[in-house]
Image (cartoon, helix red, strand yellow):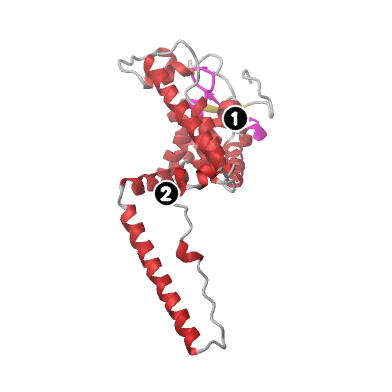
Amino acid sequence: MADDTVMETLTDGRKVRAETLAVAPAVLGLTLAEPWKRLGAMVLDLVVIGLLSLLSGPILAIATGSMLVVLLGNKEPAPVMLNLARWVCRVVGVVFIGVAILVLGHWSFVRSEQLNLEMLTGQAESPAMKKTVMIDPQASDGQLLATANVLRVQVDDLKAEVATERAASGSLLGRTRTFTGTLGVTFGWSGVYFTLLAGLLNGRTLGKLIFGIRAVKINGAPFSFFDGFVRQGGYIAGVAMGMIGFVKLLWEPNRQAVQDRIAATVVVKVLAFCLDARN
């Protein structure tokens, strides 16, 4: 069912389907999660994401690659467009994982000019900044002159690097780097966390698991990785709306915040630490 929804987003000729609008009988009557529990779960999740953000870039790349591999599911048979999208995501994910493993392993191939990752990441250390110029308090006039020449060269190098950076920022590569940097801020570990964990734990994150709540699809379909991905997009939309998208759960009849509306979910009470799909 979840894969069918993904399929509809990737094909033309979509039609209105009752199961995407109706509330499943199994969902009707479930007890909605209290707002304070949802807030507590979110705070706990943000703490976990904050701790994850301390990990290095290659670890995030491995997690992102893993997310891409499983994002669109594997239900068969599937339309050609869905299969194509799956394989594109899987190939990109495997590339992410492979390059990250190379970086973690400090392979000479990565460290050499054969695969210059610093050009793509913009994390190369400035050669001019590596230079440290020390001045002896008892330096002679000749030594002071020599030190001044070294400093002049260092300043010229820094000016050249700044000019190069400004020129590169307007290039396609520079703009791509800026875009990926923005993506890392708005998505990054939070996207990986909410997508992978919610998909693995059937609509739960660590915070939801501890507070005994979980997100469920209102049409009764299993909660998928793609649903977790869509809910993460809802979090970003809620922030863009000035947080009002989150506060609305206080007066919504079914306590649906913006991420619930976007993903067609509700958050309900369940037995704490219970992973059974029926609870």
Residue extent of the magenta highlight: 209-228
Q: Secondary structure at mark 1?
A: loop
Task: From the top left corner, tell me how far across and down residue 28 is, in percent.
Answer: 54, 18
- Say which of 4 and 80 sits in front: 80
How packed is label 2: few (under 14 Cα within 10 Å), some, or many (20 or more)? few
Q: Please tell me in which quadrant of the rendered image residue 148 appears.
A: bottom left
- Say which of 35 and 175 sits in front: 175
Residue at the extreme top of the image, as rendered: 77
Residue 252 shows in this picture: no
Relative to 43, say whether 170 is above or below.
below
Q: Which residue is mark 2?
A: 119
What kind of residue is marked 2?
Answer: Met
Residue pictured at 61% horizontal, 30% vertical: 213
Residue 77 shows in this picture: yes
Residue pictured at 37% horizontal, 70% vertical: 156
Earlier sequence position, callout 2 versus callout 1: 2
Task: From the top left corner, tell me how far across and down residue 25 is, in percent.
Answer: 53, 13
Q: Would residue 221 be counted in the magenta stretch?
A: yes
Task: From the top left corner, tell me how far across and down residue 48 is, in percent.
Answer: 61, 43
Residue pictured at 45% horizontal, 65% vertical: 128
Residue pictured at 49% horizontal, 35% vertical: 96
Instruction: Determine which of the numbered discs, if any, sits on residue 204 in the image.
Output: 1
Label 2 to label 1: alpha-carbon separation: 38 Å
Relative to 278, say whether 181 is above or below.
below
Q: Would residue 51 be counted in the magenta stretch?
A: no
Horizontal side of 59 relative to 124 (left or right) equals right
Q: Please tell me in which quadrant of the rendered image residue 103 appears.
A: top right
Question: In this rendering, which labeled residue sits more in front, label 2 or label 1?
Answer: 2
Task: From the top left corner, tell me how far across and down residue 149 is, in percent.
Answer: 42, 78
Horizontal side of 104 relative to 11 (left or right) equals right
